[in-house]
Image: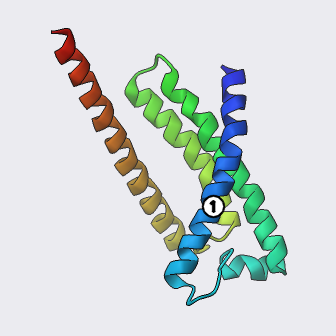
Amino acid sequence: MKKKVLLRALLGAPLGLALSYLITILISLIGGNGSYIPVVPTLTEVCGSEVIAVLLQALCSLLYGAAWAGASVIWETDWSLLAQTLLHLLVCSCATFPIAWLLHWMNHSVAGVLIYFGIFFGIYLVIWLCQYWAIRNKLRQINQRLS
């Protein structure tokens, strides 16, 4: 299992970087007024230069992608759906929050953290429900074919 986690993490790291880059492009298209916004302006201020901020974000995006991809192995265990969901949510939350904090993807305040987790859990729930319904429908189709 450790080997599978490591392999997935190695494959997920570049995916995390690619998604991060895509998100910066989308943010720039929506709110950049013709300019490219590679990082949150606050991160540039904290890092002292845009290049250092972009480098830090790239490294964190690699870690982010690796953590989420490695955590996907949890879904292949024989545990209950509840146990899998809670462990996956815990692992992904523990990987995501420090990166979001470090990269200033949220306000550094109690309200900012609460809003961040509200959005995070909301998105997680929507994705989880979509996956659940898709798998449930596939199982129904398989059972109908077997009947």
**Residue 12 versus residue 94: which sits nearer the camera?**
12
In the displayed structure, would residue 136 be above or below residue 147? below
* One can see residue 106 in this view: no
Q: Residues within 10 Å of mark 1 (few under 14, many from 20)?
A: many
Colour scheme in the image?
rainbow
Query: Percent from the top left, x then y, of residue 105?
Result: 60, 69
In the displayed structure image, the side of residue 27 where residue 37 appears, left or right: right
**Residue 115 versus residue 4: which sits nearer the camera?**
4
Direction bottom: furthest residue = 33
Image point 54% across, 28% down: which residue? 74
Q: Amino acid at mark 1?
A: Ser
* One can see residue 74 in this view: yes
In the displayed structure image, the side of residue 2 where residue 75 appears, left or right: left
Residue 22 picture quarter = bottom right
In the displayed structure, would residue 110 be above or below residue 84? below
In the displayed structure, would residue 65 be above or below residue 113? above
Image point 71% across, 30% down: which residue? 7
Reading the image, the residue beneath label 1 is 20
In the displayed structure image, the side of residue 47 where residue 84 appears, left or right: left
Image point 52% across, 34% down: which residue? 87
Query: Percent from the top left, x then y, of residue 2?
Result: 70, 23
- Quadrant the C terminus occupies: top left
